[in-house]
Image (spheres, rainbow, N blue to C red):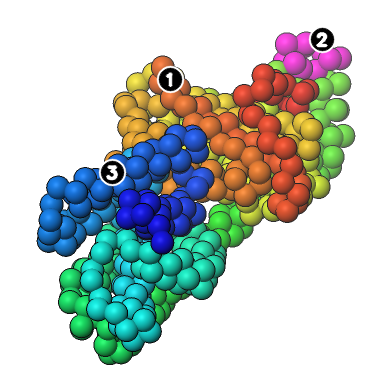
Amino acid sequence: MLSSNLNIVWGIALSIGPYFILAFIPVWKQLRYSKKTVITVGTLCMVLNIISVIMIIEWVPNWNSLRAFHSVFFLLLYLGVYTAMVRGTPAKLLFVGLLVKSYAEFIVTMAKFLEIAYLTYGLHRVYVQISYSFYFNLFQCAILVLTYPLVWIFFRKKISQVMATRNKAWSYLWIIPMVYYIISLAFGALNATLIAQWQFLVFNLVSFLGFYLIYYVVIEMLEQTQKNILLAESNEVIKQQLLFQSEYYKKFGICIEETRKGEHDLRHHLNAVLGLIQQKNGDKAESYIAELLGNRLSIADIMYCKNDAVNAILGYYANICKLEAIDFTIEAMVPQDLKIDETDLCVVFGNVLENALEANRRITSGEKMIKLASQFIGNKLYITVDNRFSGKISIKNGVYLSQKREQSSGIGIASVTAIAQKYDGEARFEADDQIFSVAVVLSNTSRTMAPDRLSIWDGRGINNNPCQLEH
């Protein structure tokens, strides 16, 4: 048998290590610090836990009276470290932390039951409660081997996905694992005789499976709610696309009609100009020609790039900016045959331009300006938008907050960031000297190929001989 201190080290390592890993599975991409720092801090907490247990056992004869206090203290410590190490909503992190803790408590109570039952009925010994005994640790290992893979899959497949959802239910979902944890503490304080009863085993199994069934149902509901939200957003995007296309084709129809009328009236206009020239009235002939040119709508006025979907969006916002006296400069090079979904393109261009338009509308004095540039290089689409704004822009946890919803991040920014990540790209947002800048890069490849990431700030320009129009 192992020495008592070695059993304590083994037992606490079993009580922390597997659950530390489990807690970070859903948030591995949301770390505030490097993975090395997170692992180091976790190891230090585990060492502190081990030392505290050894010291308390040595100095306090009745260690069991402090067990609940010790458990709650280190639970709060680990939750504090967890929220400090991970970016995310506190309610979501609390839910994951308590969910992991409820699983750990299940392992502990099951190992305690098996230890008492084995010593009492298997070895026919009188059970004496010892912290982290050899048999207790052995049964912990056995139960972990049997259950950990299933719980790992649950966290990897379900919890990881649902962490990205936005739902008010997160504010109180943490109460469910908290209730199970309190129940586990209460039953863990029972004496050995009660724990050894088969009713305790049945209750423990049924309550654990029941609570995890509740977790599963809740997570399925959150996922379904998120799908409904995405479907509603998709419908809204389609409506916007139809609006953009309608405006685009309306303008294109006017252009065709103007061209047809121009061709029909061309002979009469040429006769008029010829007459003015014969009368040696050059100034009047020049003004007559200028008037003809000014009244016609050119194809160049509605063709901003080769991509029809993006072209419709640019034309829609160009028209609004012209009506509202906003200086809108477009340098667009977007190919027609992109692998990027047109709906996603519309979300990116539509959101950044809508935000830029709203920012300019809040300007009460001074120049109003939007500048959009895009280029296609190295099978990647680069997009930058600069616009003026007035007032202050708030930042929380590195995220720009919406000026319309002061305490929440802008939905447009979140959508653009999500689409950039979807296409193995990135999105950057900066505000400096009353200029807000957006830079987005999207890979024009299949999402399963995972191409090398290319920083949008790699020094490449946005000038690749595109057409330039100013409004």
- Asked if residue 471 lies left or right of residue 186, the reply is right
* Nearest to viewer (mark 1 / mark 2): 1
| Mark sitting earlier along the chain (2/3) | 3
Q: Amino acid at mark 1?
A: Asp
Residue in the picture at 33% in, 51% down: 5
Classify 10 Å Cα crowding around label 2: few (below 14), some (14-19), many (20 and above): few
Is 278 magenta? The answer is: yes
Report the magenta residues as a range. Answer: 276-286
| Mark sitting earlier along the chain (3/1) | 3
Q: Amino acid at mark 2?
A: Lys
Q: Between residues 400 and 134, which one lies in front from this camera angle?
A: 134
Residue 268: image x %, image y %? 83, 34
Cα separation between marks 2 and 3? 106 Å
Query: Overall secondary structure of the magenta stretch?
Result: helix
**Image mark for residue 280:** 2
Cα separation between marks 3 and 1? 50 Å
- Asked if residue 268 lies left or right of residue 136, the reply is right
224 in relation to 3, above or below = below
The C terminus lies in quadrant: top right
The residue at which mark 3 appears reads as 51
Residue 241: image x %, image y %? 61, 54
Is residue 341 visible in this depiction of the protein?
yes
Is 380 magenta? The answer is: no
Residue 129: image x %, image y %? 23, 68
The residue at which mark 1 appears reads as 432
Q: Between residues 201 and 150, which one lies in front from this camera angle?
A: 201
The N terminus lies in quadrant: bottom left
